[in-house]
Image: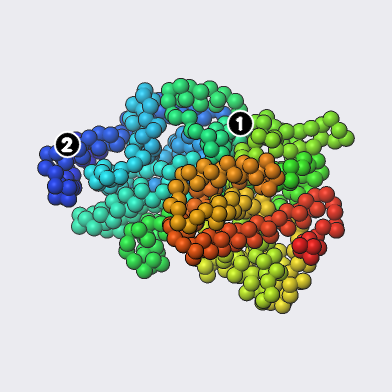
Amino acid sequence: MELTVDAIVASPEFAARVAALSEETGRTLPDVSADARRCLEEMVATVEPRSTQAWDRFGAWLSRSYSIDASTEQLRHIRELGLKHSLVFLPNHRSYLDPLVLRRVLVNYGFPPNFVLGGMNLAKWPASVLAKRAGLIFIRRSTRDDPVYPAMMRLYLGCLLRVRANLEWYFEGGRTRTGKLRPPRMGVLRYLIDAFVENCADPLAPAGEDVYFIPVSIVYDQQHEVEAISYEDTGGSKTPESLRWLYGFARAQSTRRGQVHVRFGEPLSLLESLDDARERAGSDDPATVVPRVAFDIANRINAATPITPSALITFALLDNEGRALTLGELLDVLDPLLTYVRERHLPLTSDIDLARPDGLRQALRTLQSEGVVEVYDGGLEPVFAVAPDRYHEAAFYRNTLAHWFVYRAIAENSLLAAAESGGDVVDATWSAALQLRDLLKFEFFFPRKREFAEDMRAEINLARPGWDGEGLDHEGVLKALDQTHLYVSHRIIGPFLEAYLVVASRLADREPAAPVDRDALVQECLGIAKQDWLMHRLHSPESISRDLMQGALKLADNRGLLGVGGEALREQREAFRDELRAAVERIGVVRRAAMAQIEGDGRRTISRIMRRR
C-alpha cells in the first residue's frame, strides 16, 4: 500500500490499534481514532522526487564545508541486502550535518532515500515542509502519559518495514557533548523491534523476513558546532533552534573544514540479534533484550570509527600540566602511539601522515585555523599548545579515539593497583580491572566479564607478552611499567574519573538523610570543579562537564547512593569517594611518568614515583 495517512487509517491494523487503545484508556472509539489520525498526520512523511532532489541540493549546499571521505568496501554488500530487506542506518551523532552527509554518500551509490527520524525541535518552517516530502519523519521528544502516540509510531514503523523502506535515526538521542559515543536511547529502537516482532507474528507475512541494522560512523576533521557544544557541556544554555539559528548555522558552513569521514560497520541481522539477546538475557522481556541489541550496534559503530589526525594531535597536546610541546616532543609522544595503532591494526583515515615533521605541521595548521591549537614562535623554536579556552573542544576531537585506548588505560591503572596490593599480582590486576570497568560502565561499552577478561589479557600481553605466566612480583610490575613507552590513562580515563570524584566527594559530604536534587547537584558540582581547576586541584578543565557529572550520578544511582538513609549510606558514599580517589591518585603517578618522558628525565620513573608516595 502507499504509505499515506489515509491508507494507514483505512488499514485493519489501524482499526485494531484504535480498538485496543479505546479499551485501554476508556475513551470512545471516535475520540481515539481522531487522536490517532492527528498523530499520524504529524509523523507520516513521503518521498516525492522533486522535493527529494531539492532537499538533496539543499543538503549538499549546507554541508559544503567538507569533502567526503567514504569507505565503500561495505556498500556493495549493503546495497545487495537492501534488495531483499529493510535497512536501518544507525549513525553516531556529532553534528546537525550528519543526515545530510550520509544522504550524499548513499545517493552517490544508488540507494533510495531513507526515511529519517528526527526531533520535532528541528521542524522549522519552511524547511520542514520540504523535508517531510523528502522522507524526514519529525517525532516528539517525549510521549510520557500518551499511549496513542507510541502506538501509532509502532504502527507506522511496522508499515514502513512491510514495504521494505529504509530507515535512519540517531539513537544516542542527541549530539555527543564529549566526542565519544553516548549511551543509546531505547525509545525508537524499542518501537521498531516491537513493530518487527508484530510483523513476524502476522500469518500473512513472508517467512524469514528480516531487517538489517547498518552501523555508521561519521567523524569530522573539524566542527563549527564543537564550540557551542562545549559551552553547553560546561553549564551554558543551549541556543534554541530557530530560523535565525539556521541562518547563522548555514553561514558558518562557508569556511572549509577539511574532510568528513564516513565508515560503515558490519551489518547486523535483527532476527539473529534478537535470538542472541534473548539467549544471553534468558528472557523475552524487551526491557532486557533491547539494550543488548543496542549494545551490539554501539560496539559496531565504535569498531568502524577511524582515528583522525585531529584526534591524535589533541591526544598528544592535552593533559601535559599546561606545558606546550615542541614539534620534536610531539613526534616523540606520537611515535609510540602510532606503533601501538599499527600493532593492533586500528582503522586510520587515509590522510594521516604524522610520523614526519611536514605531515605533523600540516595537521597542526588545520587545528590552528580553527583556533583550537595555538603556536608560539618568538623563542628558539615553535611550541604548540591547546588554546587556553579551547580544552573542551580539543577533548571532543581526542575522545573520538578514546574507545580504542580505554583497555590500555585500564591496564595501566590496574597494574599499578596490583603493585600497591599485598596479594597475588594477577588476581589483584583482574580485581582492579573489574572495579574500573564498573566505574566507567556508563561512559564506555564493555562486553560481558568473561570477554572483558580476555580483552584485558590480550591488552596487557601486547605490552608485556606472557606477563601472567612469568610470576611477576610487585617490583616486577613496576619495572615493566617503567619500560613502556606509551602511557595513556591520564589522557583517556583521567578526565572522566576526576569529574566523577568531584560528584562522589560532594555526595560523601552531604547529610545522608537529605534528599538529593540531581539537577541542583550537577550544577553545584560544575561550580566546584571550576574552583578546583582554578586552584590547580583538577588536572584538566575537561572534567568541568555536565555530561560527565550526569554520568557520575547514574553510577551513584546504580549503586544505591542517591536515596536517603543513615550512617550506613554515609559509609557507602565515602567508600565510593575513596575508590575513585585511589584510581585518580594512580592516574597521577602515570601523568608524572609521562611528563618525565617528554622532558627526558629518566629519574622520574613509575617505580621511583611509587616509592616516594
Distance from Cα at disc 1 to Cα at disc 2: 48 Å
Binning the other alpha carbons within 10 Å of mark 2 as few (below 14), some (14 to 19) or many (20 upward) gives: few
Secondary element at tag 1: loop
Given residues 477 and 128, the one toward you in this image is 477
Secondary element at tag 2: helix
Specify whether 520 is left or right of 594: left
For residue 445, say whether it is visible: no
Specify whether 31 is left or right of 455: left
Picture coordinates of residue 415 (x, y %)?
Answer: 68, 66
Picture coordinates of residue 305 (x, y %)?
Answer: 56, 48
* In the depicted structure, whether residue 341 falls above or below residue 10: below
Query: Which residue carries the number 1 mark?
Result: 257
* In the depicted structure, whether residue 534 falls above or below residue 296: above
Given residues 494 and 576, the one toward you in this image is 576
Specify whether 383 is left or right of 536: right
Disc 1 marks a residue whose amino acid type is Arg
Disc 2 marks a residue whose amino acid type is Ala
Picture coordinates of residue 260 (x, y %)?
Answer: 57, 37
Q: Earlier in the sequence, mark 1 or mark 2?
A: 2
Given residues 568 and 596, the one toward you in this image is 568
Residue at screen point 80% across, 41% down? 326
* Image quarter (top left, top right, bottom left or bottom right) of the C terminus: bottom right
Residue at screen point 28% across, 56% down? 197
Which label is found at residue 34?
2
Quadrant of the rendered image containing residue 378: top right
